[in-house]
Amino acid sequence: MSFQFDHIVHFVHQPLEAMKLIQKMGLHVVEGGRHDHLGTYNALSYFDLSYIELIGIFDQQLIDTPDREKYSLKETIRRNPHTNGLRRIALRSSDLEAEAERFRRLGLEVYGPSPLSRRRPDGSLLSWKLLFVGKSDETLDLPFFIEWQESDKDRRQDLTQRTIMANHPRGNLSLSAVGYAVKDVEKTIHTWANYLDIKMETPFNDEKLKARGRKLKLEGGDIVFYSPIGNGIVSDILNRRGETPFLITFSGSEQEEDIQTLGATYRFTK
């Protein structure tokens, strides 16, 4: 079994307003819908089946309601609901029951898989299962895991027909990686590589970020951990927010640049 990158959760105070800022960067973004059980609503930007979820709160009371599942996305949002920024990634699997059992064998606490759904703006229902895992002594939230009701082929066709998935004005973009600011690259990447059963790539330095990085290769978007080697974005993120995702990298852009927006860095490469 193997995971694929599914999406990155970008928390914003007003998703529909955030859409306008993301569109100005040359990205195709559409309104998503409401998670009535969670008290959130979203907007979405797709890069094939990998996507960015701009998520905000419409019902604070629902967010504040204690969750039966530890390590849930609601718990992550509830810890810091007042700051824009990247929060967490979701990885896709075709068999969450088997993955849940494997995580238990690795000593993780496991919650789910649980069936969930969201009502689209046109009234249609989208369904999936979620799995949350963690360990009380982990300072960095692990990914959560999703199993869609439809196959990848059917989802791609449906998203294209609905123009949820469409060309980006900025170019033929792919979501190539999500970057995390962490205190210790080696410790973190060895932990995640073990949990996710993914091979580690060779370390490298990123002079623009003033950081040392190391990558977990993943279909749909890599996971890259960065620790500071000087004063820069990564050291600043750690000082202000602690260990967290902070960077989304895209390939295929007609123009290379880093854009700081809504508490995150969007990096465009050719």
Image: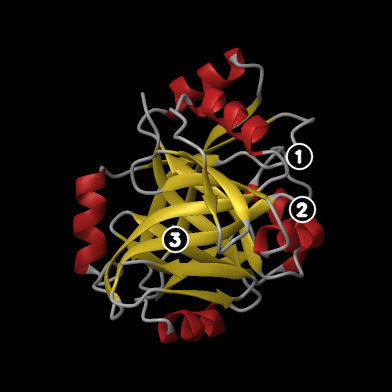
Q: Which residue is mark 2?
A: 242
- Residue 203 visible in the picture: yes
- Relative horizontal placement of residue 134, taking residue 53 as reference (left or right): right
- Judged left or right of residue 172, residue 97 is right
Label 3: which secondary element: strand
Out of 214 and 84, give the one closest to the viewer. 214
Q: Is residue 168 above or below residue 252?
A: below
- Determine whether the residue tagged by mark 1 lies in a helix, strand or loop: loop
Residue at 39% from the left image edge and 28% from the top image edge: 95
Asked whether the residues under the numbered discs 2 and 1 touch, taking CB atoms below 8 Å apart as contact, a structural biologist would say yes
Image quarter hosting the C terminus:
bottom left
Colour style of the rendered protein structure: secondary structure
Q: Earlier in the sequence, mark 1 or mark 3?
A: 1
Mark number displayed over residue 249: 3
What is the x, y in percent for residue 118?
47, 58
Q: As displayed, is residue 42 above or below residue 130?
A: below
Residue in view at x 31 percent, y 69 percent:
164
Residue at the extreme top of the image, as rendered: 105
Q: Residues within 10 Å of mark 3 (few under 14, many from 20)?
A: some
Q: Which residue is mark 1?
A: 139
Identify the residue at horizontal 49%, vertical 44% (top origin).
Answer: 223
Image: 226 above or below 256: above
Give the crowd class for mark 1: few <14, some 14-19, many >=20 residues within 10 Å.
few
**Quadrant of the rendered image containing residue 247:** bottom right
Q: Which mark is residue 255?
A: none
> Taking 18 as reference, is 198 left or right?
left
Q: Amino acid at mark 1?
A: Thr
Q: Position of residue 214 (x, y in %)?
A: 52, 41
- Of label 2 and label 1, which has the lower sequence position? 1
Residue at 42 percent of width and 81 percent of height = 25
| Distance of label 2 from label 1 (alpha carbons) | 9 Å
For the N terminus, the image quarter is top left
